[in-house]
């Protein structure tokens, strides 16, 4: 990775000093360089590029406020499966200045509000708006950022209550109902740039004063920052006193800060569990998918209320139809799997349903949870069950006319069952040609007479025919056309993979297992997944096509950079994947977009088996 850093930054000198620091998420250290001393963080984790790109953008945003010291961001670099973030190096051995830290944080939080006032003032005279810096009027951020390792929902939103609800409250209906009372005493909330992950380990002091680092910035309510500051402590009373000299405490601040602190507790609990499961040899055991839908209750309602969603993990995805018929003559609640292939099987799992209904005046509530039931592909709530009778008694009650009902579907699969669904038995290329076949004989004769080209793989070399390479593959056709005297090439693949590709090119045989993508999807990068998708779409390998699209949607869609503005090879790939001879909506790019939207309404929980000892063993 250091070679790639030297190349991209044009460095001659890059020498490590001072050892390394870090934890579950990334590791880093100081480096002497031509640009001065640098601090470089490294990670090989999945989606580390998104994390570092978000941190780079966060540092840029905080740096531009010129209100508090942050490391100047230099570059975020990704090479193969390794990623790094490069910033200036700051010596954090200065004297503590807590009051200055509090004032600097307050000035940072007020920076956008000052820009809004300056713009309003500038609008009163000719030419003023052209000189004024552009303020932010929404909540969110222009790129995803990660608090710890978990991505934050940074989509722009005009209403802070709705933005905050998306990240935390949708999973906690009981808490969600109390939110209006928590925010009733506060007026208009102005978007403020926040650090986003400001605990005691993410600030220090240099000789010039306080420094904050490792941000997960976005535009939020300024009190949001205080939630994580209170969570772990480490900020003395002088920090808060100085902060509130500039931003006075608003009525009801204690409850709101507790709410924000709850969000950070949940976030760090999830991050800690992920670190534990990875480091403790934890094995993924179950996948839990939770979908919620809501509709307005109408006393004379005879409609069918439907929702479509998908449960996706890695390279596998299942589409679902959930509907509830309110017709008094034929009431029904049903969940059905949409089979993508005629002979695709239904995985066995468990289902749990629950509902929460509230009357229009919020003076009556009805709620009930059904016991978990086994199912496979289709589940219809029994008419003689208590859940069935209670929910329709509520829906058909005049007392709840005009109210709202929220239905929750929870589906649980064992990992082996989820990935073990039988796929379509599609026609595939030949896997073997006998030695006495005319194609095998002709190929052997050519190779016996001519092995004048060497392919150097990661683990060995292959000698083959330059003429056959020129005729059989686009890559070598272009290479040899450009340089007719070429006699060798280096490919960054193992020898076995190259040999199988040459078998396909020379003889039309293909004996690599298509299901390998389901077993090893975590090791496949975005670029590799797109190339697999391109090949599968071109050759009409339906199962491989499904797996590649599911993988991109689940793991890489936010980072999907292929679009109509792409150039070179990326642009050509996009053009191929953005068309369909049947209908535009069947093009892979449009199919993935629709799938991503359906997946967005589902909460996914991963349940691990670990070697954690029992409570009694801890005591002993």
Image (cartoon, helix red, strand yellow):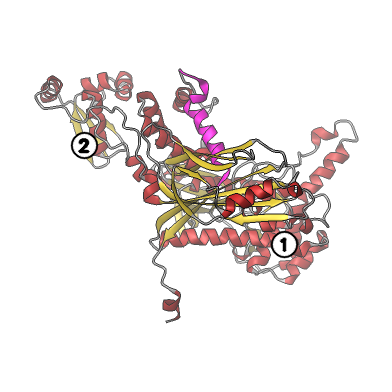
Q: Residue at x 63, y 68 (%)?
A: 232
Above/below status of 460 relative to 501: below
Identified at 57% across, 42% down, the residue is 332
What kind of element bears circle 1?
helix
Q: Pointer 2: residues within 10 angstroms few (<14), some, or many (20+)?
A: some
Residue to which mark 1 is pinned: 257
Percent x, y for residue 306?
Answer: 59, 37
Counting from the top left corner in percent of width and height, residue 572 is at 45, 23
Task: Give the residue drawn at x 82%, y 55%.
Answer: 186
Q: Which residue is mark 2?
A: 461
| Mark nearer the N terminus (2 vs 1) | 1
Of helix, strand and loop, which mostly describes the magenta segment? helix
Q: Secondary structure at mark 2?
A: strand
- 187 over 136 or under it: above or below: below
Membership of 410 in magenta stretch: no
Q: CA distance from mark 2 to mark 1?
A: 62 Å
Q: Which residues are magenta?
A: 582-602
């Amino acid at each position: 990775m250091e070679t790639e850093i030297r190349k991209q930054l044009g460095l001659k000198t890059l020498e490590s000093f001072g050892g390394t620091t870090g934890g579950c998420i990334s590791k880093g250290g100081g480096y002497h360089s031509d640009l001065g001393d640098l601090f470089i963080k490294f990670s090989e984790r999945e989606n580390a590029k998104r994390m570092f790109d978000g941190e780079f953008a966060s540092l840029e945003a905080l740096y531009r406020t010129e209100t508090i010291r942050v490391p100047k961001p230099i570059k975020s670099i990704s090479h193969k499966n390794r990623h790094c973030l490069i910033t200036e190096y700051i010596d954090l051995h200065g004297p503590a200045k807590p009051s200055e830290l509090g004032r600097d944080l307050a000035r940072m939080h007020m920076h956008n509000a000052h820009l809004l006032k300056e713009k309003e003032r500038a609008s009163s005279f000719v030419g003023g708006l052209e000189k004024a810096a552009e303020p932010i009027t929404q909540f969110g951020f222009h790129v995803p950022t990660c608090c710890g390792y978990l991505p934050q929902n940074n989509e722009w939103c005009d209403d802070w209550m709705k933005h905050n609800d998306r990240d935390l409250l949708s999973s906690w209906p009981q808490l969600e109902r109390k939110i209006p009372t928590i925010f009733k005493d506060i007026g208009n909330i102005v978007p403020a740039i926040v650090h986003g992950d400001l605990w005691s380990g993410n600030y220090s002091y240099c000789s010039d004063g306080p420094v904050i680092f490792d941000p997960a910035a976005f535009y939020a309510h300024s009190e949001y920052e205080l939630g994580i500051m209170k969570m772990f402590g480490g900020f003395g009373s002088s920090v808060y006193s100085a902060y509130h000299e500039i931003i006075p405490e608003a009525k009801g601040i204690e409850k709101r800060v507790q709410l924000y602190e709850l969000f950070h507790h949940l976030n760090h609990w999830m991050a800690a569990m992920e670190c534990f499961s990875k480091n403790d040899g934890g094995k993924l055991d179950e996948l839990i998918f939770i979908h919620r839908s809501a509709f307005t209750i109408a006393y004379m309602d005879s409609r069918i209320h439907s929702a479509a969603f998908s449960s996706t993990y890695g390279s596998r995805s299942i589409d679902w139809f959930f509907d509830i018929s309110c017709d008094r003559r034929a009431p029904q609640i049903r969940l059905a799997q949409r089979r993508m292939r005629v002979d695709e099987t239904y995985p066995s799992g468990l289902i749990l349903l629950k509902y929460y209904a509230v009357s229009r005046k919020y003076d009556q509530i009805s709620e009930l949870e059904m016991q978990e039931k086994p199912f496979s592909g289709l589940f219809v709530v029994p008419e003689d069950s208590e859940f069935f009778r209670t929910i329709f008694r509520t829906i058909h009650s005049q007392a709840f006319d005009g109210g709202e009902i929220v239905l929750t579907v929870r589906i649980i699969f064992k990992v082996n069952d989820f990935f073990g669904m039988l796929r379509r038995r599609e026609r595939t290329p030949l896997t073997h040609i006998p030695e006495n076949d005319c194609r095998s004989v002709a190929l052997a004769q050519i190779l016996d007479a001519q092995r004048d080209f060497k392919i150097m793989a990661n683990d060995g070399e292959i000698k083959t025919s330059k003429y056959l390479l020129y005729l059989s593959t686009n890559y070598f056709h272009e290479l040899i056309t450009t340089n007719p005297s070429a006699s060798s090439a280096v490919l960054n693949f193992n020898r076995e993979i190259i040999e199988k590709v040459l078998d396909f090119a020379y003889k039309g045989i293909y004996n690599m297992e298509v299901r390998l993508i389901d077993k090893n999807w975590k090791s496949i990068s975005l670029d590799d997944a797109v190339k697999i998708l391109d090949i599968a779409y071109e050759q009409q390998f339906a199962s491989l096509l499904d797996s590649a699209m599911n993988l991109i949607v689940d793991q890489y869609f936010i980072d999907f950079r292929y679009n109509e503005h792409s150039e070179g090879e990326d642009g050509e790939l996009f053009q191929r994947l953005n068309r369909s001879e049947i209908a535009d909506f069947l093009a892979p790019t449009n199919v993935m977009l629709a799938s991503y939207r359906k997946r967005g309404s589902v909460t996914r929980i991963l349940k691990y088996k670990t070697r954690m000892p029992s409570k009694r063993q801890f005591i002993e």
